[in-house]
Image: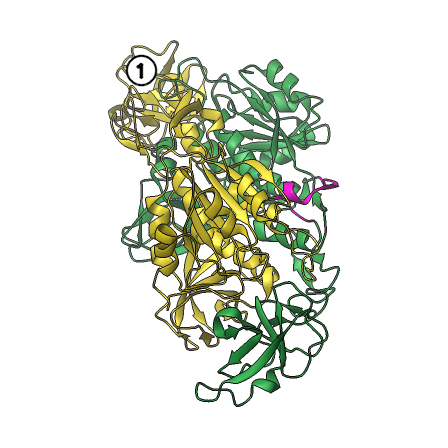
Chain colours: A yellow, B green
Amino acid sequence: MPGTSNNRGSSRRAGYWDVRQRGFDGRVSVEEAIEWVDSHTPCLRIEEIPVEQSAGRVLQTAWQAPAEAPTNDCVSADGYAIRSEETVGAGNYNPLLFSIQEGITPLLPASVARVAAGDALPPGADAVLPFEAVQANQGTLEVSSAIVPGAGIARKGEQVRAGNELLPASQPLRPQDLGLAASFGLTALPVVRQPRVRLVIAGAKPCAFSRPGDANGPMLRALIARDGGVMETLCSGRSDRQAIAHAITGASADVILVAGRTGTGADDEAPLALAAAGEVAIHGIALRPGGTVGMGTAGSTPVFLLPGDPLACLCAYDLFAGRMIRRLGGRRPGLPYVAREFELVRKLVSTIGVVELCRVRLAQGKAEPLGSAEAGGLASAVRADGFVVVPAASEGYPPGARVEVYLYRELQT
Amino acid sequence: MPGTSNNRGSSRRAGYWDVRQRGFDGRVSVEEAIEWVDSHTPCLRIEEIPVEQSAGRVLQTAWQAPAEAPTNDCVSADGYAIRSEETVGAGNYNPLLFSIQEGITPLLPASVARVAAGDALPPGADAVLPFEAVQANQGTLEVSSAIVPGAGIARKGEQVRAGNELLPASQPLRPQDLGLAASFGLTALPVVRQPRVRLVIAGAKPCAFSRPGDANGPMLRALIARDGGVMETLCSGRSDRQAIAHAITGASADVILVAGRTGTGADDEAPLALAAAGEVAIHGIALRPGGTVGMGTAGSTPVFLLPGDPLACLCAYDLFAGRMIRRLGGRRPGLPYVAREFELVRKLVSTIGVVELCRVRLAQGKAEPLGSAEAGGLASAVRADGFVVVPAASEGYPPGARVEVYLYRELQT
């Protein structure tokens, strides 16, 4: 019965329900699982790091400008500082002459002073004529058009007022954010510490025709990095209950991911290992692909059990484990892909009672489903341009329906 | 005169035209400058790197699947392998009984065999019943609904056929791409070498009210990394002609960026330094902000002269220097931001004859210009959600016009 939470309940009271060779006793809804993730995310401390190393890192609180910019009226163009009122009436048939004074302060009547961008504005001047706009001739400047006051200058506080919110919280710092912080003379920024992740690869099964190599190790490592985490340890080939339990015990990581051995096969011992080393909160979610995902805690450390099938592993990571890593690092928790609306070229079929992630390909501005939610393996997530999240209550969509597609090649930062 | 290329011509024949205190003799169009970038991008060699380190790296040629996946018919669900034809007629009021055989091969009549995802399909079986769909009782299985042939199994080559294009060229490798490569047993991938960039900060001018710190160093470092480059050397505070010329001579980098000292002020000596150390191909482009950008070569190494004003530096980097870094690394050369169409809430004014990059903010699904192309300083690129590229031929757009906005927080990968 989708939406119920028998396993969660039973694991808390009477030990973990062993699904091996009998199947799941119920499935937790995606919403409940997300609630568990959100309520079990620890809080990481803040650390000060040099501005030039803080790209992609996240401020926990918004950053207010410590001063105004510019701090005083200044010149924003290379040229001649001038009193704009003295140019009134200048024209091609009425060029006005100014003398070019040496030194920039104070500006004498009918005079101009050579200035460069970033200079203080000479007292008296209220505009700057760029060099190419005028003719200079032996200490004399010919001005043949009027200039508006304020041209070529930047007023105190014009770009930034002290106290303005400049950098928001929860968003990875971009190149221009670093530049702005540095321009205010900051050398370090207080950012959320990067979540440390222990990755346990529970090992391929003996007979794995479709997987000569382990897909999940390299894939999860890259996903963790994408979401701002740091892989602290990689434990490979832990296949039996004891070895997995050992790998998730006493870790100094902020979160532990175990990949593989979460299903209903005889050797799917990851949930039993978690039950032995800590507590299984959820095992089995009304989700496709990725429904064998589990989560719980070992000591106070959150542990995610990700399916061994690489496509299911990707989907379960994105929705749950990645969500916690993004939250831990202070980022927005939602899927990190840009979502855009597209029209379906053909029917998209989905099972009621289960959230399905269906991969689609874009062609001629429309979205074409690549098959059912569980079809195609990891290759379908490589070929696809993105995926549609079909809610549990939906049976799918008819051709022509407009659906939100999460795009694998467009990332929110 | 926008669109002309006097500087380029004169620099080739009769030495560099010194713009200091007299202004530019003409401006090269953005299109011509992009043409120069594209025709002066060297080709980097390919290197083999471990799959798990290749996230974000780029294949020069598309990757064809070396084998089929699965390599043989196999099981894709944990449960009981069965002959689907033997389940025809099964129902709640007509449960059919099967004996659970030990060992999986071959499948006897009216029998099922326990299998797990990844197992070879037992000969004779053509479907797998998941454990939760059936009742097992002491060696006997009760089946109360028919199963369709193919359920719970994956046929040889169903996910990937040998020779299929799996990973495209010119696109940074994603987590799932690494996973798929690893699943085929690959341990290394042939990727384009990362471009090595020398960054020369030409130093703040003596009187810089608006810039107590150097914005360009941290910003460019992060931009280079975003575009797949590696900062090889950072030379700071090279302010005069000789020091800049020295810093751009004999570099082992693939491309050199000089930030600052490109304008028409008396101490704007970066172009003269490039003219001394190599050749100035272009100085001055019909662009705002960023019109003082220059480019050329020192020996065979491309050199970009980026404006010292941080906003102008960002814009000139994104359009030209970043383009070369992206091309060098095998990526798509265009702006790396996702572009989306929005309606303007108010008029966007632009100067004819000049390409203008105008920052906008999004509110209620519409785009609001943040001021003129050169206003607001770097803070405007921090506050903005993106920018509009107004072509040289356009005077801007009326309220209600639909414009393409390049989004600072959404990156194409």
Q: With A257 as the anchor, is B180 left or right in this view?
A: right
In this rendering, the answer to whether B208 lies above or below A54 is above
Do we see residue A332 in this rendering? yes
Q: Nearer the viewer, residue B257 or A190?
A: A190
Do we see residue B402 in this rendering? no
In this rendering, the answer to whether B199 lies above or below A200 is above
Q: Nearer the viewer, residue B37 or B200?
A: B200
| Circle 1 Cα neighbour tier, 10 Å, few/some/many (<14 / 14–19 / ≥20) | many
On the rendered image, what quadrant is the N terminus of chain A found in?
Answer: bottom left
**Where does the magenta region start and end?**
B42-59
Q: Nearer the viewer, residue B258 or A337?
A: A337
The secondary structure type at the circle numbered 1 is loop
The quarter of the displayed image where residue B354 is located: top left
Q: Position of residue A324 (x, y in %)?
A: 41, 44
The quarter of the displayed image where residue A29 is located: bottom left
The answer to whether residue B45 is magenta is yes
The chain to which mark 1 is attached is A
Q: Position of residue A198 (x, y in %)?
A: 53, 38
Q: Which residue is mark 1?
A: A122
Residue at 44% across, 57% down:
A17
Q: Position of residue B112 (x, y in %)?
A: 62, 76
Q: Position of residue B393 (x, y in %)?
A: 45, 51
